Image: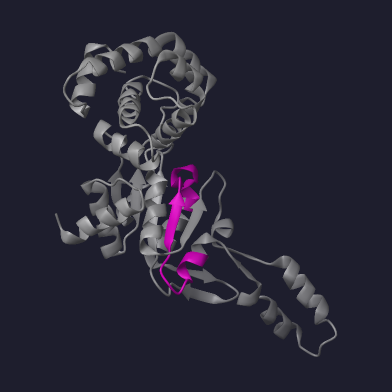
Amino acid sequence: MHPEIARIQTMLGGEGYVADREIATAIYLSMSLRKPLLIEGAAGVGKTEVAKVMARALGADLIRLQCYEGLDATTALYEWNYQKQLLHIRLTEASDRTVEQREHEIFGEDFLLKRPLLEAITREAAPVLLVDEVDRSDSEFEAFLLEVLSDFQVTIPEIGTIRARTTPYVVLTSNRTRELGDALRRRCLYLWIEYPTFEKELQIVLGKAPGINADLAAQVAGFMQLVRQAKLEKTPGIAETIDWGAALMALHRDHLDRETIEETLGVLFKSQEDARVVRNQWLDLWLRGLERLRAESRPWSQALVERVAAEGALRR
């Protein structure tokens, strides 16, 4: 492994993020080439967390632009502080300055409200810019974003062109609620994050729920692998796994059984329909799968969990 990739993997691990080689390589190349990193995957696999741990590991500021339907360039880039401008106009009404001079004053940087994109390119030290859930914005905003990320400069009519002092590290995430344009994809490096394997999820649980019983952590990770074989409206992600481990510790449970699982369904499943389907269709199968795993003498592994799932007809 390239020593810098190994260093990044260690650096992320020090921040509590379990990063495999593919993730560490994508981050290294994004940082080295200063190209935006587009991360896609199902909700809850840890896409947003990549940017957060990058910022912590680099000692850089994290600037987050949360995308949504209807987001426009003004909201993402800058706005004028109209209240401050009006106050300044009133205070200078009696001055001998010309209208042009006063207009020039109120359209200066002192009256500018920087939004995430402008804030990111005007920082002295390179921040991490997180453009979260870019697929929720519309194609017009995507085109505008592409223009900003291509040159890292913006033009404000009243001020002129502002160029980045330092190129920010950029991470874009997408849940694929709509297909992104080819132009934006070409501008970025790409990373797809899958749901974690049993081994990786176990490592995450042990790291994020300190003090958890090792056997319980293995049961949680194994059970979550079985859960993700089912067709659900909202498949639980890593965040739910971590919350579940913490909830089980709070309830002083040291193993999984039907009563424990039914009491904590609300930690894993966030819709009434999923909870109903789990109780009526899947829970018995998952419990039998868990019993098969417990009966195994060899250490649990992803291959073993998949075999148990296949034998118990737990596939989607």
At 47% across and 30% down in the image, what residue appears?
Answer: 247
| Residue 36 figure quarter | bottom left
Q: How many marks?
A: 0
The N terminus lies in quadrant: bottom left
Magenta-span inclusion, residue 140: yes
Nearest the eye: 4 or 90: 4
- The location of residue 294, given as percent across then percent down, is 26, 18
Nearest the eye: 93 or 39: 39
- The location of residue 87, given as percent across then percent down, is 79, 73
Q: In this rendering, would 77 be left or right of 89? A: left
The C terminus lies in quadrant: top left
Colour setup of the view: one colour
Magenta part of the protein: which range?
119-141
Q: In this rendering, would 28 be left or right of 69? A: left
Whether residue 27 is situated above or below residue 20 in the rendered picture: below
| Residue 114 figure quarter | bottom right
Residue lying at the far right in this picture: please name it: 94
Whether residue 188 is situated above or below residue 241 in the rendered picture: below
* Residue 168, visible in the rendered structure: yes
Nearest the eye: 2 or 183: 2
At 29% across and 49% down in the image, what residue appears?
Answer: 190
Magenta-span inclusion, residue 289: no
- The location of residue 272, given as percent across then percent down, is 54, 19
- The location of residue 2, given as percent across then percent down, is 15, 58
* Residue 314, visible in the rendered structure: no
Whether residue 80 is situated above or below residue 92 in the rendered picture: above
Q: In this rendering, would 11 be left or right of 210? A: left
Residue lying at the far bottom in this picture: please name it: 96
